[in-house]
Amino acid sequence: MVGAGIAGLAAAHDLAVDHDVLVLEGSPEIGGKLRLATVAGVAVDVGAEAMLNRRPEGVALARDLGLDVVHPTSATSRIFSRGALRPMPRSLMGVPFDLDELAASEVLSADGLARARSEVMTPVGGDVSVGDLVAARLGDEVVDRLVEPLLGGVYAGRARRLSAAATVPQLVTMAGRGSLLEQAAAVPASDVPVFAGLEGGMGRLPGVLGAGLEVRRDATVRGLRRDGDGWALTVGSTRSPETVLARRVVLGTPAAPTARLLASAEVGVASDVAAIESASVAVVTLGLPREAVAHLADRSGFLVPPVEARGIKASTFSFAKWDWVGRAGGDVAFLRTSLGRAGEESTLQAADEELVARSLAELAELAGVVAVPLDSHVQRWGGGLPQYAVGHLERIARVRAGLPRGLAVCGAWCDGVGIPAVIASAHRAAADVVRAE
């Protein structure tokens, strides 16, 4: 197993039931984008802090491992639009459930709202971008002020470049059936929480998942080639490389290193994987005096559309969103900001201190948070979020069809960037490589 992110660990966990599995991780840490760091004396998430609850894979794995699954509080989210923080209208990735609720939120201008009410029944033919699909039906403003910030929070991408079929397949299905607005309005209300987390943080999952596995850290895999009926992996430094032999190999690495390993093995679909772009983001975690954020106790955070031209794209009020964070912090309130979108990597080239200062300035202006942090932490995720361009599903199908026997791939670049989707990708890879026996 190459890679000890959540994909690699989940695939190894599946395979270890009936196989001897060795996990090779190039860095000193396991867990990929799931990570805890100590801020103001408290271990908090500095990577992914939640997973979809309405997909079963993440919650099921956590419970199987004996971890306590928790859900967000009743605190509500906001969106910064047209100069103010406004209630977040309920929607399916920006397609509103209730036009009156959308109007009351004042997220859109009067012209934008009028255009949204006048849905144009454009046909859907083949894969298109999310932005193009929704703009044709409901107008540019719905895309700019609703779709963009929601997609940006998940993919750090641009709505007019991301594949609708790969990112929001429900919208494609709905558009093929008829009116997006009518179908969104008919979505039944549900008491099932949308999101889930773990008591103590999502960053606990990798340690528990990897506890029963043989994992070698600082073991970079630099080459892969056929060796009889199996594979030979070149591991370690270029000065003193080691050869590891394996009957089967699963690559759970990001797209770029996966492409390099496939190329070294002379697998033709390496170019398809290499073409998958990624976006870099930074997460700034702030420990603030609790009294400075008392006015935010009923809010879970806010999103910022790119059209607002702000430095941060989102903020999470972790102390209010998660009971365990509020309890653990005591008099310290933890907030996070997220910076960076596809094509904006230059904004992340500033020093950590500058990203903290930028976050504090925008929290003061947008949310009325005026405080000197007791502690702060900056986590940079270089190339952390794959971008699903139009045609992504066809690309992944070609990749899987072109893999030789005994080699499988998994990860966020394949089938979805959320934790449940990545775990599902790992389950599939484990099953694929076993079928090759």
Image (cartoon, helix red, strand yellow):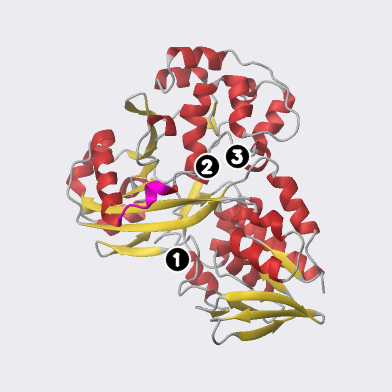
Please name which of the two marks, 2 or 1, marks the residue nearer to the observer: 2
Amino acid at pointer 1: Arg
Q: What's the CA distance linking mark 1 and mark 3?
A: 31 Å
Query: How far apart are the alpha carbons under marks 2 and 3?
Result: 7 Å
Residue 109 % position (x, y): 42, 16
Check disc 1 and report the residue beneath it: 204
Amino acid type shown at disc 3: Leu
Q: Of the residues tagged 1 and 3, which is closer to the observer?
A: 3
Magenta run includes residue 348? yes
What's the CA distance linking mark 2 and mark 1? 27 Å
Asked if labels 3 and 2 touch by Cβ distance under 8 angstroms, the answer is: yes
* Circle 2: element type: loop
Residue reaching furthest front? 239
Q: Quarter holding the C terminus?
A: bottom right
Q: Quadrant of the N terminus?
A: bottom right
Residue 99 in view of the camera? yes
| Lower position in the chain sequence, tag 1 or tag 3 | 3
| Position of 243 relative to 430 (above/below) | below
Taking the magenta stretch, the answer to whether it contains residue 82 is: no
Marks 1/3 in contact by CB < 8 Å: the verdict is no
First to last magenta residue range: 346-351
Q: Which residue is mark 3?
A: 162
Q: Residue at x 65, y 32 (%)?
A: 171
**Mark 2 vs 1, N-terminal side:** 2
Determine whether 106 is above or below 263 in the image: above
Left or right of 426 in this view: 331: left
* Residue on which disc 2 sits: 157
In the figure, is residue 100 to the left or right of 61? left
